[in-house]
Image (cartoon, helix red, strand yellow):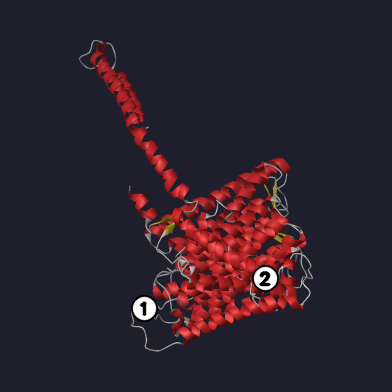
């Protein structure tokens, strides 16, 4: 299996999906990540497939514990997403999903910055089709914005890589830290994909617009590839602690008032990335282990939550909290799986979030970052509040909406079941996950202190929700758009340009009119002298006159069109 | 798709007000127990504040959540626009 770099199997396999007969297609697609996963189990650690090109040494595959962990979970996520999409007949989505997953896997094994760039752009180009496949006007526009931002991130990465090569003389993708212009550009490129504050809106914009199955793919790969890249290139960069802490806290305010439940999940995804970024910023072995472990369990429960909301959207045609309610009566399995995902993201003991997030919070406390520690605790309570309670409550409980949709299709239930099983398995028995972390660890998540304090935090958060609901203080779900930073480029800048255009266009027209008028007069003058009746025409050959008229016409046209 | 069906006539356990009350009571009792539990074991803590107050995490979570929701509610006054806000922006 080492004959093929990790990820390439899914990319090539994805390209030929349309050629595979419909009957075999699902089995074929599912086989790809399974074979790919098996390949990871036997690939030896180290650098493979190195070659020289134009004097650069490229190493497309570098295998170590960090890349392997992301490789494993990306394959698992791909397999689950594929099963969830078994009912889809649209070859565009199938191809896009596989290439997207393959590119993310390839990126996690990239040993140099140029290879990383290629896969980086690959994820952008493939994933946008999962948004466009919704085939609505809004999805088209969202996709364009998404593509511009994602490709822009890649361009920054390439520019940074070239400058870094000039500065450091190497293209190797290893720890670099913020040591110059090159790494700084790469840092911003990673930051865009990791949805740093103010660079984050593509996420909340795009994920709710993608197809029911597309969002499940999207939730797993892009942002976690960025987390991997940050952990590889910038561990221990202190700025990341503060960036990450901000990320954990501010999206949850939006999540509370957002009506589109898939967008609520996008905000909470942003919040979970914050925990991982804090871990990278702290940079100790415990913290980096925490980031890796949290990325692993996060991909599972986030996919599970997006799947359950996808199933609701698929069956009811809406995902607005204001229109849903009471669905547990006819979709009990989906509701149950959603609650397992909610318990996992909220880090209830015995669920996956508990055994991974605690490494990061413990690392923050151990290193004496007490403000950050308090922010992380607040964010943990907050995530339970909006993801743990709000999502299942507004979709499946609250008042009865009268909807009695059918239970989710079987393939969706199987995919959710696998994810739910893994969420609990990782939570109950974390040893196998701890064994594949980048550093050896003897961390014990299940101590009395940890279990009791975490239960206090969560139970009282639930009590707060109940109190706010009972007293009517809780803000109702309302159909609305909440302004976020994307307002600047979706409203302010276009307005500014329109305003500028409004004043500039008339002035511009006037200037052109004057110029054109001058040229007209000039030609008329020339014609008077050089035309057939003109004085000078007697001595000039007609050919040269034609030539000059042609030249002037050309200038006239150029001025006109500029 | 079956969303237009009339609601079934079946009655569900959660539909009854008294059962919802039972759940709320259970939650309150669980909260109480979690605080009392603090008195019965030796806490391994990083910060002194964790030891001062029994149930410190609980109070922090409760106050944090109320603060979160109420301030988000205030934010709505500044941030909330109509659902088609960006679509209509396109037309003018």
Residue A213, given in percent of the width and then of the height, sits at 48, 70
Name the residue rendered at 23%, 15% in the picture: A528
Residue A452, given in percent of the width and then of the height, sits at 70, 75
Name the residue rendered at 37%, 88% in the picture: B9
Query: On the image, numbered disc 1 is attached to which residue?
Result: B3
Quarter of the rendering occupied by the N terminus of chain A: bottom right
Instruction: Look at the numbered disc 1 and give the secondary structure of its residue.
Output: loop
Query: Which mark, residue A39?
Result: 2
Task: Give the side of residue A312 with respect to residue A187, left or right.
Answer: left
Name the residue rendered at 72%, 66% in the picture: A359
Q: Residue furthest left?
A: A533
Task: Identify whether A89 is placed above or below B83.
Answer: below
Between circles 1 and 2, the one closer to the viewer is 1
Instruction: Using the numbered discs, state the Cα–Cα distance from disc 1 to disc 2 in whole angstroms.
Output: 45 Å
Can residue A379 be seen by looking at this rendering?
yes
Instruction: Look at the numbered disc 2 and give the secondary structure of its residue.
Output: helix
Task: Give the side of residue A508 with respect to residue A130, left or right.
Answer: left
Name the residue rendered at 34%, 29% in the picture: A507
Quarter of the rendering occupied by the C terminus of chain A: top left
Q: Residue furthest bottom?
A: B10
User: Which of the pair A51/A516 is nearer the observer?
Assistant: A516
Residue A431, given in percent of the width and then of the height, sits at 74, 75
Quarter location, residue A231: bottom right
Task: Give the side of residue A112 with respect to residue A388, left or right.
Answer: right
User: Which of the pair B9/A262 is nearer the observer?
Assistant: B9
Q: Residues within 10 Å of mark 1 (few under 14, many from 20)?
A: some
User: Which of the pair B8/A24 is nearer the observer?
Assistant: B8
Quarter location, residue B56: bottom right
């Amino acid at each position: 299996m080492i004959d093929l770099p990790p990820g390439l199997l899914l990319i090539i396999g994805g390209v030929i999906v349309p050629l595979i007969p419909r009957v075999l297609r699902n089995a074929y697609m599912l086989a790809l990540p399974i074979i790919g996963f098996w390949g990871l189990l036997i690939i030896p650690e180290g650098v493979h497939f190195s070659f020289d090109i134009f004097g650069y040494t490229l190493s497309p595959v570098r295998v170590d514990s960090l890349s392997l962990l992301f490789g494993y979970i990306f394959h698992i996520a791909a397999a689950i997403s594929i099963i969830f999409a078994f009912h889809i007949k649209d070859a565009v989505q199938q191809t896009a999903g596989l290439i997207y997953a393959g590119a993310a896997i390839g990126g996690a094994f990239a040993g140099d910055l140029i290879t990383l760039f290629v896969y980086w752009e690959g994820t952008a180009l493939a994933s946008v089709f999962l948004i466009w496949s919704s085939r609505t006007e809004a999805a088209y526009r969202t996709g364009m914005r998404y593509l511009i931002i994602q490709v822009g991130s890649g361009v920054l990465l390439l520019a940074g890589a070239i400058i870094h090569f000039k500065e450091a003389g190497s293209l190797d993708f290893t720890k670099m830290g913020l040591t110059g212009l090159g790494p700084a550009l790469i840092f911003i490129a990673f930051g865009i994909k990791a949805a740093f504050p103010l660079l984050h809106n593509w996420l909340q914009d795009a994920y709710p617009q993608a197809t029911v199955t597309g969002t499940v793919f999207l939730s797993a790969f892009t942002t976690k590839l960025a987390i991997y890249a940050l952990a590889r290139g910038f561990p221990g960069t202190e700025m990341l602690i503060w960036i990450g802490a901000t990320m954990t806290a501010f999206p949850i305010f939006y999540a509370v008032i957002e009506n589109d439940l898939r967008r609520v999940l996008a905000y909470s995804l942003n919040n979970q990335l914050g925990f991982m970024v804090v871990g990278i910023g702290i940079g100790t072995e415990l913290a980096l282990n925490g980031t890796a472990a949290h990325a692993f369990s996060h991909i599972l429960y986030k996919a599970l939550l997006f799947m359950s909301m996808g199933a609701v959207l698929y069956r009811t045609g809406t995902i607005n909290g204001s229109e849903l309610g009471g669905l547990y009566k006819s979709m009990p399995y989906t509701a149950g799986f959603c609650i397992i995902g909610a318990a996992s993201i909220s880090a209830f003991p015995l669920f996956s979030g508990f055994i991974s997030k605690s490494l990061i919070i413990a690392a923050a406390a151990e290193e004496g970052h007490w403000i950050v520690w308090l922010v992380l605790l607040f964010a943990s309570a907050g995530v339970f509040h909006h993801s743990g309670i709000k999502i299942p409550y507004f979709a499946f409980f609250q008042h009865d909406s009268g909807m009695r949709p059918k239970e989710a299709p079987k393939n969706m239930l199987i995919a959710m079941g696998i994810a739910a099983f893994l969420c609990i398995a990782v939570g109950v028995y974390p040893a196998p996950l701890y064994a594949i972390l980048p550093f050896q660890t003897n961390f014990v998540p299940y101590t009395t202190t940890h279990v009791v304090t975490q239960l206090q935090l969560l139970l009282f958060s639930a009590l707060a929700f109940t109190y706010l609901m009972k007293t009517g203080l809780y803000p109702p779900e309302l159909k609305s758009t909440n302004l976020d930073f994307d307002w600047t480029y979706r409203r302010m800048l276009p307005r500014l340009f329109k305003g500028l255009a409004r004043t500039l266009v008339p002035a511009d027209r006037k200037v052109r009119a004057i110029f054109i008028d001058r040229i007209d007069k000039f030609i008329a003058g020339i014609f008077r002298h050089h035309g057939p009746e003109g004085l000078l025409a007697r001595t000039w050959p007609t050919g040269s006159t034609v030539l000059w008229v042609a030249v002037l016409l050309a200038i006239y046209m150029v001025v006109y069109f500029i | 798709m079956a969303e237009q069906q009339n609601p079934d006539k079946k009655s569900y356990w959660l539909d009854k007000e008294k059962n919802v009350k039972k759940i709320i009571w259970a939650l309150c009792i669980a909260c109480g127990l979690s605080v009392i539990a603090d008195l019965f074991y030796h806490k391994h803590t990083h910060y002194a504040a964790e030891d001062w107050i029994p149930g410190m995490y609980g109070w922090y979570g409760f106050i944090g959540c109320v603060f979160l929701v109420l301030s988000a509610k205030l934010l709505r006054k500044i941030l909330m626009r109509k659902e088609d806000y960006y679509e209509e922006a396109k037309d003018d």
